[in-house]
Image (spheres, grey):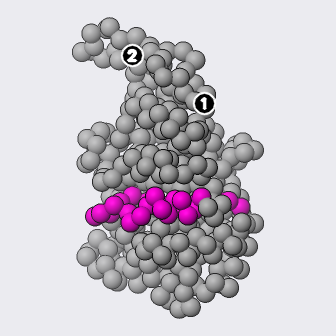
């Protein structure tokens, strides 16, 4: 099983010594380093800085929001960074949610599955550079042919020749149809919340995946002799995602918890959070849920849980940044010793 380091997106300030963390991950034998974006820092600029100070680790976005850039803009950025890094880029993408897409990017969230499929079609055309980029889609049209068009556009090929004909693209997805789209069209799947004991709920969606399809799972790790203390940050995160990350009527994370068997508990957490009872919402998050999707507790306990992850279809564990440089490095060293 491979290991990756997920640095996330910057909070109020840039992530402390993020380049040094990536260098440490590379030295330990990590496969990849991921950076993300929400509505603050972007995902590509930190990777460019990391690319200049590393030589072998894969550089991945996780996830790039497809509403943030047109498919061609993303293609231009990707082929540029792929050249700079010597062919080490892999793109993790996702549709985000209606609150961000409509509130931050000012775009409609309609038909996300269709938009993802068309986006990938155009992105792959840019990178392949086999013909002028063109698509007469419902969400993307190249050349543009709207009622206000000058009708002077023509299909174009990138001036710069890409380093590779194909840059791997992974899809961040939670819903069954989106996961099935990942298995059909993408090179891998980036799940945010999965349990090695409940992977069967994804069997139907993943049935058509190709042989070398990657499943890169986000698995936060907290080493502590006090299991209750170790579980608490995960309970805080889950309460936020169930209550504050998504609309009440349309919360992909809450829907996933229902499919995992925690539907009633997720409903209660959301209601408490939206009522402003944040601490009660945190306490209502089931310990069993957080325990299954993370690696928490004493080292020996984590060693045992790692065996269950190794038996699962997951191909890479993506450990998160703890928020503290020294703790993150210590966690990286422990995982490298156990798995590499």
Name which residue lies at 61% across and 68% down. 195
Q: Is residue 21 above or below residue 188?
A: below
Q: Nearer the viewer, mark 2 or mark 1?
A: 1
132 vs 335: above or below: above
Identity of the residue furthest to the front in this view = 53
Whether 259 is drawn above or below 156: the answer is: below
- Describe the element under mark 1 as helix, strand or loop: loop
- Please provide percent x and percent y for residue 121: 52, 29
- Residue at 59% x, 38% y: name it: 87
| Numbered badge on residue 164 | 1
Quarter occupied by residue 40: bottom left
Magenta-colored stretch includes residue 12: yes
Q: Position of residue 154 (x, y in %)?
A: 40, 11
Inter-mark Cα distance, 2 to 1:
24 Å
Residue named by callout 2: 143
Q: Mark 2 or 1 closer to N-term?
A: 2
Callouts 2 and 1 close, C-beta under 8 Å: no
**Quadrant the N terminus occupies:** bottom right
| The C terminus lies in quadrant | bottom right
User: Callout 1: few (<14), some (14-19), or many (20+) C-alpha neighbours within 10 Å?
Assistant: some
Q: Position of residue 67 (x, y in %)?
A: 37, 40
Q: Which residues are magenta?
A: 1-26
Which of the 4 image quarters holds residue 86?
Answer: top right
**306 or 49, nearer to the observer:** 49
Q: Give the crowd class for mark 2: few <14, some 14-19, many >=20 residues within 10 Å.
A: some
Q: Nearer the viewer, residue 47 or 297?
A: 47
Whole-percent x, y for residue 205 in the image: 63, 49
Q: Is residue 233 magenta?
A: no
């Amino acid at each position: 099983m491979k290991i990756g380091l997920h640095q996330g997106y910057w909070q109020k300030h840039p992530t402390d010594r993020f380049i040094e963390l990536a260098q440490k991950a590379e030295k330990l034998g990590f496969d990849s380093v991921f950076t993300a974006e929400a509505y603050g820092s972007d995902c590509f600029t930190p990777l460019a800085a990391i690319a200049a100070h590393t030589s072998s680790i894969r550089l991945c976005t996780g996830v790039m929001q497809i509403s943030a850039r047109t498919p061609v803009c993303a293609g231009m950025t990707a082929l540029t960074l792929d050249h700079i890094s010597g062919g080490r880029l892999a793109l993790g993408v996702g549709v985000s949610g209606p609150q961000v897409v409509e509130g931050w990017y000012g775009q409609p969230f309609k038909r996300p599955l269709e938009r993802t499929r068309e986006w990938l079609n155009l992105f792959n055309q840019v990178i392949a550079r086999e013909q002028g980029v063109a698509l007469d889609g419902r969400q993307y049209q190249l050349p543009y042919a709207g009622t206000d068009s000058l009708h002077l556009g023509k299909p174009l090929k990138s001036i710069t020749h890409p380093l590779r004909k194909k840059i791997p693209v992974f899809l961040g997805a939670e819903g069954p149809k989106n996961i099935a789209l990942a298995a059909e069209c993408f090179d891998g799947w980036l799940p945010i919340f999965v349990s090695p004991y409940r992977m069967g709920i994804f069997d139907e969606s993943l049935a058509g995946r190709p042989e070398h399809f990657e499943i890169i799972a986000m698995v936060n790790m907290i080493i502590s002799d006090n299991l209750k203390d170790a579980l608490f940050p995960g309970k805080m995160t889950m309460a936020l995602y169930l209550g504050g990350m998504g609309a009440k009527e349309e919360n992909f994370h809450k829907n996933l918890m229902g499919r995992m068997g925690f539907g009633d508990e997720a409903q209660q957490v959301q209601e408490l959070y939206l009522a402003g009872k944040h601490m009660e919402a945190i306490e209502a998050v089931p310990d069993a849920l957080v325990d299954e999707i993370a690696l928490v507790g004493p080292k020996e306990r984590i060693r045992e849980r790692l065996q269950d992850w190794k038996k699962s279809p997951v191909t890479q564990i993506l450990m998160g940044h703890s928020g503290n440089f020294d703790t993150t490095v210590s966690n990286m060293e422990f995982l490298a010793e156990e798995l590499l």
